[in-house]
Amino acid sequence: MRNLFVIYIIGMLLVGCTQNNHEANDTLVQKGDAAFARREYAAASNYWRKAHLKSPKDVSLVNKLGDCLLKLGRIERAKSYLLKAAEIDPDNINTQIKLAQIHILTGNLSAADNICKVYEEKNISLPELSLIRADISLMSDQLELAEKFYRTAVIESKDSLRPLMKLAIFLKSSNRNEEAAEILEIVKKNQIISPRIYLLMADYCLLDDQYDKAELYILNAIKIEPEDITLKYFLVQFYLISEKIIEAEKLLERILENQDDIYLRMMLADIYILNNKLKKAEKIILELKKEIKNPSGEFELLQGKFWLHSGKTVYATSHLKSAIDINPGFVNTRYLLGLTHLINSKTKLSENSLTRTLQIHPNHYKALLLLSELLYKKEEYDLSLKYLNRLLEKFPNDFTGHIMRGLNHLGQKKYLLAKTDFQQSAYLSSKFYVSYYYLGITEELLGSEMIALKYYKQVLEIFPDLLDASYRYCMLLLRTGQPKIADDFIKRK
């Protein structure tokens, strides 16, 4: 009887301990929920991490941790938790959607696409899935498909502003300005605009090169929720787009003072490379080598960029090839590989890489420009013009595109067509002497020597030390019977 009593007491104690553990765990979760609601993300993360240690298979808890770590800007850490959640419950659609969003954020389109395909096969559709598929289609230059998915997301989500703004941005980028503006006005009428909508409004402004307005929208988003580090990450991206690389560097350095996220450190190393601070970039890369255990396309790409900027193109080629092997969808990597091959005088390999880049992303600006230049130098004018026409259809006000197309027309002796392109380039940017220089050559070839003189004079006013322009100017002065002006010009030189 006494033994039965002891067993009963031990049993009750065990039950009591279990209940206390559950209560403690529930309390931690509740405290985390409350902290998250107050936007105290670091505190929420701590509570939920402790609760996760007690209930490692609680998928909803792991998802909460992922959300919280994203707010803290710890992208790689959030990704690792979400991958754990996906292992525990592969059918959890919320986990998979968040993973796909992170994959898009970090440029891994193929991984995001694979997630979408699983739900497509199951005939499952949700607004967020449609938006992800739309973004992937847009980034892969499948414009009709992108529009279809954006419109589907708008219908599926009813009154949500996010799909509406995404659609407006797409329409604006497709030059359907009227419908885009109507959608923007609908969004602006809402009394409460969330930080994420402000970011999309900034993207919309960037399509019109309204940099000041775009920056204001991003700052508004940060003002609403300063605790969300990812909003500052978008400000870093904005600075990069607007070529304020020093500001991007300073802001990212401040963000990383209180954390050590791998993805953001890779981004900072990338910015150091752009700012030609190669020693600082190398220091981060060497630290990351010790930490990154699994093959990473992003890290291989970063190392490729570092060696390319360091002038060691053999190393750059090796890392860029590895990045493509790990992630064949890295479009910019293929472009950089093409550039590296060209620097190494491997013209055919360069052409192959650039062509492959354009097969994946038909409107990749730098690949179109570089490939057209490569073909121009090979005197394959028709093929070069094919790529330049595609570039100028997408970017009609591109100064360099008009210069390159004019040069191809010169090569074909189509002087009037060349003149039109050079005039357009001069209209787009009067600060550069190159337009006047080529206009001078074109007018010479057309026999308009006095007009050519005028252009060469304009060139030399901007860039007086250009020897070829000086030579052509003097020779034309002599041919047009102006030896004294030619003599005075030579004496001044």
Image: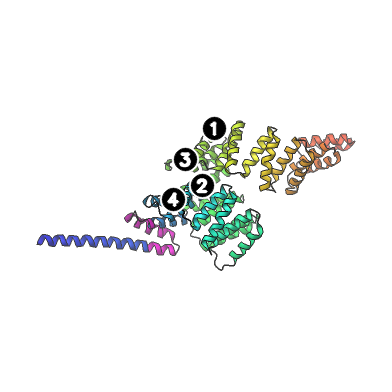
Percent coordinates x, y for residue 137 in the rendering: 55, 49
Q: Earlier in the sequence, mark 3 or mark 4?
A: 4
Marks 2 and 4, Cα distance to the nearest angstrom?
15 Å
Label 1 sits on residue: 314
Label 3 sits on residue: 286
Marks 2 and 3, Cα distance to the nearest angstrom?
27 Å
Q: Earlier in the sequence, mark 1 or mark 2?
A: 2
Pointer 4: residues within 10 angstroms few (<14), some, or many (20+)? many
Pointer 1: residues within 10 angstroms few (<14), some, or many (20+)? some
Percent coordinates x, y for residue 285 in the rendering: 48, 41
Indicate yes or no whether the magenta region holds residue 181: no
Q: Which residues are magenta?
A: 31-60
Q: Secondary structure at mark 3?
A: helix
Indicate yes or no whether the magenta region holds residue 46: yes
The amino acid sitting under disc 1 is Val
The amino acid sitting under disc 4 is Lys
Give the residue drawn at x 14%, y 60%: 6
Marks 3 and 4, Cα distance to the nearest angstrom?
22 Å
Mark whose residue sits in front, 2 or 4: 2
Name above or below for residue 161 compared with residue 253: below
